[in-house]
Image (cartoon, rainbow, N blue to C red):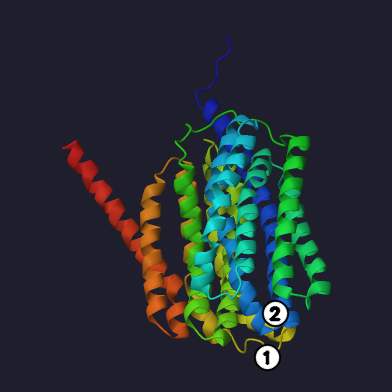
């Protein structure tokens, strides 16, 4: 009878975790490169629009496009929960049901367009209707994203995202002087819808590209509504300044605020691909090293991206669209200050919630931060009140979250005694 050393299982576990780490690094790198390319092209669309259509039209368009960014961020909760669920089973049983529920729950948002028209000061309701439709199709794209992430088809996901950005830019340029706001919104809606449908078809045709993991963490009680709300609140720090500027500051200030948020939020968008690549490994017992490595990448990318954008961004904009928004260096600093800390906070929160942490605590903390940011921006008639909003939001959010953690720890100690 052959003696099996006691250390053999741990050696096998170590080898499995090592393989998972290597796969996770490759996938994170691939998705970061492709995701960053798509984000760069989407940012280029805004700058090209500013150059071709002028400051006035851009001040009208940028608050509308912000709805797409909010939808993309708020859908992260459903996307990550569905990714983890598919990664456990490698089946698509719930995909049609989730897709139908998204459209059924979001279409009623069209009823809010008259209120938004009044608050944001638009003369016509049509741009707000287009913004609501863009919100719906962008949110629904979380489903094909989740399927491709869980199946390991990251190349397909990245290529389609780049294709969407390229097609939107190419189709818009000939129409830049013909109702540019309506053209930009209609093209964005069409490209997003077709891209999502294409990803879903490719996902069903290709099937899983990775094997079913042998060891999984226990399933969590996913509260998709809570996670959706958390995702929405995560992106508001760099969307609220645009809306607050449109509602309360002079029209000439809106493009400066919008471009500043566009540049800085680009560094946060670099974190999304890393988080997406790490989610399937967060449900695996052998994925701890992969997740920790991804966490370091997320913070490093956001920090380097913020620094680079502060110094390179204004020069790039002055070359592409000279005399459109002026020198942004001083205005970018307060926006960029909080970006790396938001990045590490967002990544850690999604990983913890995927592993079973309560999303309600994050939701309450983020709501307090949003209220503080809105209070600061609405009571100030200067650019600084809007620009320092993300930093104030983060400080309040972290304070409330820290208080909740201390309180929970004290309750546990009292229960033990």
For image coordinates 67% across by 48% down, the residue present is: 27
Cα distance between the residues tagged 2 and 1: 11 Å
For image coordinates 67% across by 79% down, the residue present is: 57
Return the mark for residue 89. Answer: none
Q: Give coordinates of residue 26: x percent, y percent.
A: 68, 49
The quadrant in which the C terminus is found is top left
Describe the element under mark 1 as helix, strand or loop: loop
Asked whether the viewer can see residue 308, the reply is no
Q: Give coordinates of residue 96: x percent, y percent.
A: 64, 36
The quadrant in which the N terminus is found is top right
Q: Circle 2 sits on which residue?
A: 50
Q: Give coordinates of residue 49: x percent, y percent.
A: 72, 76
Closer to the camera, 254 or 125? 125
The earlier-in-sequence mark between 2 and 1 is 2
For image coordinates 73% across by 74% down, the residue present is: 180
Q: Residue furthest top?
A: 1
In-image side of 84 versus 27 (left or right): left
Q: Is residue 329 above or below residue 149?
A: below
Q: Residue furthest right?
A: 174
Q: Residue furthest left?
A: 417
In-image side of 74 versus 31 (left or right): left
Q: Is residue 383 above or below residue 335?
A: below
Tell me whether circle 2 and circle 1 mark residues in contact (CB < 8 Å).
no
- Which dot, 2 or 1, sits closer to the camera? 2
Closer to the camera, 360 or 101? 101
For image coordinates 84% across by 73% down, the residue present is: 174
Q: Circle 1 sits on which residue?
A: 323
Report the number of discs: 2
Describe the element under mark 2 as helix, strand or loop: helix
Asked whether the viewer can see residue 174, the reply is yes
């Amino acid at each position: 009878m052959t003696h099996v050393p006691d250390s053999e299982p741990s050696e096998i576990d170590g080898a499995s975790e090592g393989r998972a780490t290597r796969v996770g690094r490759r996938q994170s790198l691939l998705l970061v490169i492709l995701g960053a390319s798509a984000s760069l092209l989407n940012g280029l669309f805004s700058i090209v629009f500013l150059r071709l259509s002028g400051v006035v039209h851009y001040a009208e368009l940028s608050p509308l496009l912000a709805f797409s960014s909010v939808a993309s961020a708020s859908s992260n909760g459903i996307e990550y929960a569905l990714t983890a669920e598919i990664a456990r089973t490698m089946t698509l049983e719930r995909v049609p049901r989730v897709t139908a529920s998204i459209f059924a729950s979001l279409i009623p948002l069209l009823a809010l367009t008259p209120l938004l028209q009044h608050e944001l000061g638009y003369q016509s309701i049509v741009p707000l209707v287009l913004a609501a439709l863009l919100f719906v199709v962008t949110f629904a794209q979380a489903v094909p994203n989740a399927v491709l992430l869980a199946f390991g088809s990251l190349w397909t996901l990245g290529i389609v995202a780049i294709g969407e950005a390229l097609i939107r830019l190419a189709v818009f340029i000939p129409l830049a002087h013909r109702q540019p706001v309506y053209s930009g919104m209609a093209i964005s809606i069409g490209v997003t819808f077709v891209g999502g449908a294409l990803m879903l078809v490719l996902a069903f045709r290709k099937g899983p590209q990775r094997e079913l993991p042998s060891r999984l963490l226990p399933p969590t009680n996913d509260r998709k509504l809570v996670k959706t709300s958390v995702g929405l609140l995560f992106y508001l720090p760099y969307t609220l300044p645009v809306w607050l500027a449109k509602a309360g500051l002079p029209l000439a200030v809106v493009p400066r605020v919008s471009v500043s948020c566009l540049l800085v939020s680009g560094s946060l968008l670099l974190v999304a691909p890393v988080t997406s690549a790490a989610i399937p490994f967060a449900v695996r017992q052998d994925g701890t090293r992969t997740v920790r490595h991804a966490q370091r990448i997320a913070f490093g990318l956001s920090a380097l991206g913020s620094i680079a954008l502060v110094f390179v961004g204004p020069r790039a904009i002055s070359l592409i669209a000279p005399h459109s928004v002026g020198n942004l260096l001083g205005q970018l600093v307060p926006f960029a200050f909080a970006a790396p800390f938001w990045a590490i906070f967002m990544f850690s929160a999604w990983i913890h919630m995927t592993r079973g942490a309560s999303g309600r605590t994050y939701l309450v903390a983020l709501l307090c931060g949003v209220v503080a940011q809105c209070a600061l921006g609405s009571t100030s008639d200067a650019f600084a009140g809007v620009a320092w909003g993300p930093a104030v939001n983060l400080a309040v959010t972290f304070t409330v979250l820290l208080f909740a953690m201390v309180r929970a720890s004290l309750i546990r100690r009292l229960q033990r005694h």
